[in-house]
């Protein structure tokens, strides 16, 4: 009893009183979100039809055709969203993967409904429907973003979510903790660590207390209310694993092992299987040739279009730079591009003179990334990409190891995961993990998802998840 009292005192000093969670609220949020998906799709289509009717009434079909097309499109979209896993509890950084799946579902639904409208001879103008359906995509993205914020708030307040313990305090455990903190919408709150070294009892690792060892797992699970256990040790005796598994099963606790990858981050690992035997290998972090051609085409077409659209803002920024800076309106930065080739990255000189205080106009131009618009020229020239890893400085590349140099397999980007994350690390292994996570999963839909998040972030910056 004295030992349990001692453990309870440790837990109380570390995490205080456990907040009351409402497990049923998770199912309610999921149900409301699915209903909101259907409502936002219908609302978006009818907003589109309303706008088209105000501008050109003759382009619209009869009401029955609009109802049929709206229900067909909404039903098809909901089925595809369920098929790709959008109704599951799947998480990624800033829910980029969710946006990617929505775009894929929307494209597939567009093709399917257009084919259905053709075969059924439904009398509605195809271009009018596509415009209305595009507005439906926007309303769906807004709806999902609102629910992302709601979910994150509920998880932050620990009204919903789960509590976890981590067995181990090494590099794998620290990496797992960083990932969980980077994605607060997962709702996994780490209550403490377990470590079998008695000298470390009560000390902190990354701000989290070591509450006890593996022999105290049963009372720690009860006192912390943990329903997840992560084992992040390089070697665990079979008997210890068996005992832990028995305790977890008895309490209904989810039990997972973080593989030891010799300090290599998970995005670098390729997982394959031969008849149930898992095989781990190191990915080469390269695009397939046809994907590389498509990405380059997107850079040229979309980069030129964006440059044309934002040219008035660019001219305004150049005029400001001319009147408030000495020398050229452009600054050039030496960076290392694809294959280790030296590139000169362009940027507007909107910063203040050395003898002048920061100007309001210069701050605004930097806040909305107008000073970064000249980098679109780098994109069109082929030195950079719209989306990619952070452009590396020459002095940093000199000290890179083999894994860091994987970043040089692709062109650096104007934006990327490193730009849209609230607390993205500047350099080091954490920055490398973020860049490699993009490189290993890059696709046209992922690029479009990151571009959409970048635009959203320029208008409404996300707060730090910490």
Image (cartoon, rainbow, N blue to C red):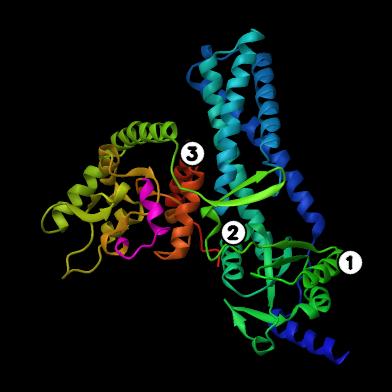
Q: Is residue 429 visible?
A: yes
Q: Position of residue 455 (x, y in %)?
A: 43, 46
Is residue 399 in the magenta section?
yes
Q: Which residue is mark 1?
A: 250
Residue 200, relative to residue 23: is it above or below?
A: below
On the image, which quarter does residue 113 sit in?
A: top right
Q: Which residue is mark 2?
A: 183
Q: Position of residue 226 (x, y in %)?
A: 77, 69
On the image, which quarter does residue 68 sit in?
A: top right
At 48% from the left edge and 60% from the top edge, which residue is drawn? 422
Q: Residue furthest top?
A: 121
Q: Position of residue 393 (x, y in %)?
A: 29, 60
Q: CA distance from mark 3 to mark 1?
A: 43 Å
Q: CA distance from mark 1 to mark 2?
A: 29 Å
Between 365 and 179, the one nearer to me in the picture: 179
Q: Label 2: few (<14), some or many (≥20) within 10 Å? A: some
Q: Nearer the viewer, mark 1 or mark 2?
A: 1
Q: Which residue is mark 3?
A: 443
> In the image, which residues are magenta?
397-410
Q: Nearer the viewer, mark 3 or mark 2?
A: 3
Q: Secondary structure at mark 1?
A: helix
């Amino acid at each position: 009893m004295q030992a349990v009292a001692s453990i309870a005192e440790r837990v109380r000093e570390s995490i205080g009183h456990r907040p009351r969670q409402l497990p049923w609220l998770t199912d309610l949020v999921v149900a409301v979100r699915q209903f909101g998906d259907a409502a936002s799709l219908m609302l978006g289509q009818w907003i589109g039809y309303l706008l088209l009717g105000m501008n050109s009434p003759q382009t619209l079909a009869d009401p029955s055709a609009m109802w049929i097309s709206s229900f067909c499109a909404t039903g098809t979209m909901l089925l595809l969203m369920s098929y790709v896993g959008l109704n599951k509890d799947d998480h990624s950084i800033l829910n980029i993967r969710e946006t990617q799946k929505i775009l894929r579902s929307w494209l597939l639904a567009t093709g399917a409904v257009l084919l259905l409208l053709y075969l059924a001879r439904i009398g509605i103008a195809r271009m009018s429907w596509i415009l209305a359906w595009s507005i439906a995509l926007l309303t769906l993205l807004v709806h999902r973003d609102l629910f992302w914020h709601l979910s994150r708030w509920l998880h932050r307040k620990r009204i919903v979510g789960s509590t976890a313990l981590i067995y181990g305090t090494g590099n794998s455990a620290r990496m797992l903790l960083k990932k969980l903190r980077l994605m607060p919408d997962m709702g996994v709150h780490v209550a403490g660590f377990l470590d079998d070294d008695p000298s470390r009892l009560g000390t902190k690792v990354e701000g989290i207390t070591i509450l006890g060892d593996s022999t105290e797992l049963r009372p720690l699970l009860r006192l912390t209310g943990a329903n997840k256990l992560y084992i992040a040790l390089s070697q665990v005796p079979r008997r210890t694993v068996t005992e832990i598994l028995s305790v977890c099963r008895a309490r209904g606790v989810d039990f997972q092992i973080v593989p030891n990858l010799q300090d290599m981050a998970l995005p670098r690992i390729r997982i394959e299987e031969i008849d149930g035997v898992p095989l781990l290998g190191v990915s080469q972090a390269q695009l397939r040739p046809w994907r590389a051609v498509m990405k380059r085409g997107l850079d040229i077409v979309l980069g030129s279009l964006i440059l044309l659209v934002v040219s008035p803002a660019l001219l305004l920024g150049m005029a400001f730079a001319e009147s408030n800076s000495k020398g050229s309106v452009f600054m050039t930065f030496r960076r290392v591009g694809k294959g280790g080739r030296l590139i000169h990255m362009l940027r507007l000189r909107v910063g203040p003179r050395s003898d002048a205080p920061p100007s309001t106009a210069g701050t605004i131009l930097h806040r909305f990334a107008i000073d970064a618009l000249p980098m679109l020229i780098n994109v069109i020239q082929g030195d950079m990409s719209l989306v990619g890893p952070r452009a590396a400085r020459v002095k940093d590349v000199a000290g890179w190891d083999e894994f860091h140099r994987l970043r040089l397999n692709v062109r650096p980007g104007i934006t990327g995961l490193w730009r849209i994350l609230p607390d993205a690390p500047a350099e080091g292994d954490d920055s490398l993990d973020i860049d490699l996570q993009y490189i290993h999963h890059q696709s046209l839909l992922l690029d479009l998802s990151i571009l959409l998040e970048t635009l959203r972030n320029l208008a409404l910056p996300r707060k730090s998840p910490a």
